[in-house]
Amino acid sequence: MIKGLAITPPILGRISIGRVVEKKGKRIPEKDDQFTITSQVQTWDAWVNHPLDEELRQRTTDSKLRAIPVRLLLNEPDLNLRAEYSLFDRQSGRPVCVGDGETCRRRTETGMQTLLCPSPDGCELAKSGCKPFGRLNVQIGEEDELGTFIFRTTGFNSIRTLAARLSYYQAVSGNLLACLPLELRLRGKSTMMSYRTAIYYVDLTIRDGMTLEGAIAEARQTNERRKAGGYDQAALDAVCRAGLGNGAFEESEEDVSAIAEELFPDSEIDETSGASEPEIREDRATVESGLKGKLQQKLVLQQFTKSE
């Protein structure tokens, strides 16, 4: 095996909940309220949709794709979802520093170094744009039993929710995570940071119409069938872990530019709402003006009532 090259799960396409658009001469990410499944082919304007995208849309009664039936390739949660603090170079798009809050791998003038990682809150270098960066590999369909689709995100809500779900499902199923019938689901929430507008994040659930007990029973049947056919899940997990640990950074030179453009843009993007700072200020002004108008109406009504 070539040293220094991370061997990642085979990727057939991408899963996203947004796209890159051009605004005022800059290409910035724009959030969406649905999934899009793309191939690995990108034109000047956008990624080319994968045939599975249209196939799944035809199955749903909704006009938007908000749930995707999936399975996982591996039993270990941290192999399916790799989440780290990542800092990308704004000029080249190459990763500069990747850490887990304890140690980090960093490119320096003297080469690659392993250093302490105090997390972005306590790191001076992190001020230039270090963010949580998660990558989830899932299987869609039955065409390729080892091929996966990758979902990349810097969203804290998605990373935290997916990490919790993976650990919980592994525990309750008796380490049969790769055999469970699961579903990627888009969820919405609103916060003060998003000015009460809906924001979306990705969750991982048991497939619609199934109970947890039923899903575990199906996972046990799938596991027994695989064992009878000679399928060695433990060996697959071990090989994947060794492959991922073979390189300092997971992303290849071909991927980093597109990833940096989509997830680490030049303009500062609010991670919660997907809006740039000027747009946030505009939204805040709109909200404040609306509240001011309501208060004025209330005062007028109170004065009118008193005069009556």
Image: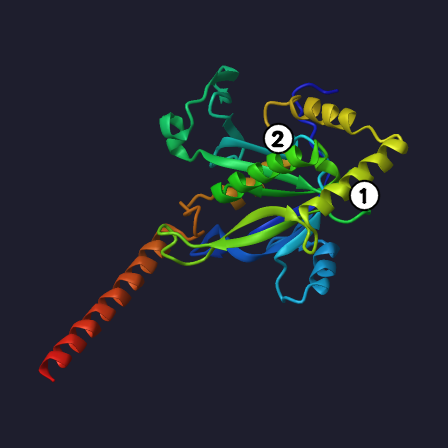
Q: Do the residues labelled 2 and 1 touch (CB within 8 Å)?
A: no
Residue 240 horizontal/vertical position (percent): 71, 27
**Residue at (77% x, 49% y) in the render:** 141
121 left or right, relative to 86 = left
**Tag of residue 78:** 2
In terms of image quadrants, where is residue 65? bottom right
Query: What is the secondary structure assignment of the residue under circle 1?
Result: loop
Q: Which of marks 2 and 1 is nearer the N terminus?
A: 2
Q: What residue type is labelled 1?
A: Asp
Q: Which of marks 2 and 1 is in front?
A: 2
Percent x, y for residue 250? 62, 30
Residue under pointer 1: 144
Q: How crowded is mark 1: few (under 14 residues within 10 Å), some or many (20 or more)?
A: few
C-alpha separation, residue under disc 2 versus residue under disc 1: 22 Å
Out of 204 and 144, give the one closest to the viewer: 204
* Closer-to-camera residue (50/195): 195
The image's mark for residue 297 is none
Residue 213: quarter of image: top right
Give neighbour class at mark 2: few <14, some 14-19, many 20+ (Cα, 10 Å). some
- The amino acid beneath tag 2 is Asp
Q: Where is residue 35 in the image (x, y as percent from the top left)?
A: 61, 55
Whether residue 139 can be seen here: no
Q: Along the horizontal axis of the image, is 23 left or right of 297?
A: right
Q: Is residue 294 above or below residue 41?
A: below
Q: What element carries label 2?
A: helix
Residue 126 screen position, x and y as percent: 40, 30
